[in-house]
Amino acid sequence: MLAGCAVQPPVVAPSAPTSISAAPLIVLDSGHNPADGGAISVLGSKEISYNDRFVAELAPALRAAGWRVILTRQPGESLSLVGRARMTDDLQASLFLSIHHDSVKLGCLRQVTREGRIAFETRRPTGGYSLYVSKKNPDFTQSYRFATMLGEQLHALGRPPMLEHAGTACGESRPLLDARLGIYQYDPLAVLRHNKVPAILLEVGVITDLQDELYVNNRVNRGKMIAGIVRAADMWVRSEPMRQQPRGASSEND
């Protein structure tokens, strides 16, 4: 938030461009830092472990499809939110994608104990993915365009959008730009608004919901979502001419 089956990740056919210099660059961001760790799952695990695992599986799939991939941080490393955005700008990346796993308000969770560890579980079924964009990102149009393409891919998998954040009971009254595809507007998100390139944040699933945690903890399911991300990124870059001019780093502060 803000031990699956032993199956190999999907093989994605390489796409043009063929040369390293011509390949588009995507910056993958594994959300949170070790010191905070993010949400606590229904199994008592920290969100950051889910984020790191998903990014580690997504990166090679994107590379196999012809993308250059840079990670904002490796497992165990820390980097500020503004630092992540500035890295993207300095690298003149084509796209920025931040990976998170979701929860709901504390009042909509109950504390449980799993194998001697404190864990949190939703009081009622609450699952699905969600996508976030910021209108403070100077390339909001292309950010929203990629979010739509990715939402269509996840929707095609039969994956439901997580709509709780648009409500007041367990959410934060976030503006919902597309209910069918689970796309929210969240302007203050630092990694989105400080970026000068198209940037979105993906909440892969709700790890405080037992059934949704089981879904994202299954490698086959993750592989299907990863293949959808690769298809969306490929469609996005193929339908948008690559911009060659340098981009400057953001000068804003948190």
Image (cartoon, rainbow, N blue to C red):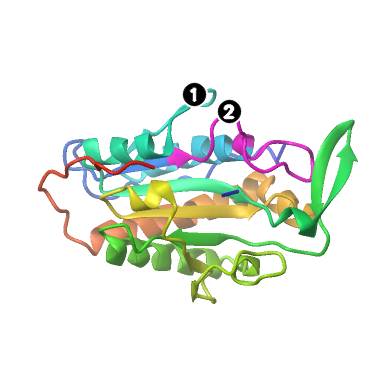
Determine whether, in the image, residue 41 is placed left or right of residue 21. Answer: right
The residue carrying mark 1 is 77
Label 2 sits on what residue type?
Answer: Pro
Q: Position of residue 13 (x, y in %)?
A: 38, 49
The answer to whether marks 2 and 1 mark residues whose Cβ atoms lie closer than 8 Å is: yes
Depth check, front residue: 206 or 218: 206
The location of residue 164, given as percent across then percent down, is: 65, 67
Bin the neighbour count of mark 2 within 10 Å (Cα to Cα): few under 14, some 14-19, many 20 and up: some
Q: Picture coordinates of residue 213 (x, y %)?
A: 72, 50
Q: Residues within 10 Å of mark 1 (few under 14, many from 20)?
A: few
Residue at x 64% of width, y 72% of height: 167
Can the viewer see residue 37? yes
Q: Vertical placement of 152 versus 132: above or below?
A: below
Q: Residue 89: within the magenta?
A: no
Residue 33 quadrant: top right
| Direction from residue 217 to residue 253 in the image, left or right | left
Label 2: which residue?
A: 34
**Residue 13 in sight:** no
Q: Residue at x 31, y 49 (%)?
A: 95
Query: Which of disc 1 and disc 2 is earlier in sequence?
Result: 2
**In the rendered structure, which amino acid carries the disc numbered 1?**
Glu
Image location of residue 5, percent across then percent down: 70, 41
Depth check: 47 or 8 in front? Answer: 47
Q: Residue at x 85, y 46 (%)?
A: 111
Q: Residue furthest top?
A: 76
Separation of marks 2 and 1 at Cα, in angstroms: 7 Å
Magenta stretch in the rendered image: 29-49
